[in-house]
Amino acid sequence: NTLTSMEVDQGRMRILARTTIGSNSFFGNENHVSEGVLPGTFVGLRTWVPKMPCSSGSLFGNPAMRFGRPAASDDFSDGTCFQKFWYHFSTSVVDLFFWKVLHAFETGVAMTLGRVIWPEYSDTWWVLQFIAELALFAAISILGWWLVSVRFCWCIYHDKVPLENPFYSGVIMRWFN
């Protein structure tokens, strides 16, 4: 994010206005905000805010356009203890550790299979053995992608799973309030 109204002309730098960010504001990535935003403003992804907006709200685009803030639904809830636990566990432990461990396991399986099939490279066929081992690594990677990203995720996310969720992330819950 670029938070300044700096102008450089013929070797001189001028700051045209002081940039002020109001409290409880949220910024997406890659924004350019010149003068600042008022408290409680949501600035989306790749948004250019050339001057201070007259009121807080949702800003998106280049230049920024105002969008209506969504209202919380009537059945909006804080979620059950299990929903909160799963949200924090999946976004901290699973996302940070499980997928990296699974990828390391995939690489380890490919390496072990390569050593079992070809314990030593021969002097005459080493090029073909090397190419075959590269193909084995590629096949294991594709198989791992298919098993995890296609089959496993299909078990979790498919047409029969309800799309509505009464529990949202902390940022979304603060935004509705």
Image (tube, grey):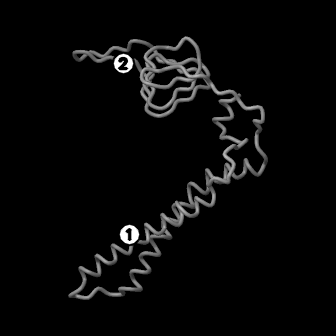
Residue at point 41%, 76% (across, down): 111
Give the quarter of the figure containing the N terminus. top left
Name of the residue lying farthest toward the front: 159
Give the quarter of the figure containing the C terminus. top right
As shown in the figure, which amino acid type bears the numbered disc 1? Ala
For the residues marked 2 and 1, what is the alpha-carbon distance in whole angstroms?
49 Å
Q: Is residue 80 left or right of residue 34?
A: right
Where, by quadrant of the figure, is residue 113 drawn? bottom left
Mark 2 residue element: strand
Residue pointed to by mark 1: 138
Picture layout, residue 61 above or below residue 86: above
Residue at point 51%, 29% (across, down): 44
Where, by quadrant of the figure, is residue 32 drawn? top left
Q: Is residue 40 left or right of residue 115?
A: right
Mark 1 residue element: helix
The spot of residue 17 in percent (x, y) is: 43, 12
The spot of residue 85 in percent (x, y) is: 72, 51
Circle 1 crowding by C-alpha within 10 Å: few under 14, some 14–19, many from 20: some
Residue pointed to by mark 2: 6
Q: Assess whether mark 1 and mark 2 are in contact (beta carbons under 8 angstroms).
A: no
Query: For residue 170, which numbered disc appears in the image?
Result: none
As shown in the figure, which amino acid type bears the numbered disc 2? Met
Q: Is residue 110 left or right of residue 165?
A: left
Residue at point 52%, 23% (across, down): 59
Picture layout, residue 30 above or below residue 84: above
Q: Earlier in the sequence, mark 2 or mark 1?
A: 2
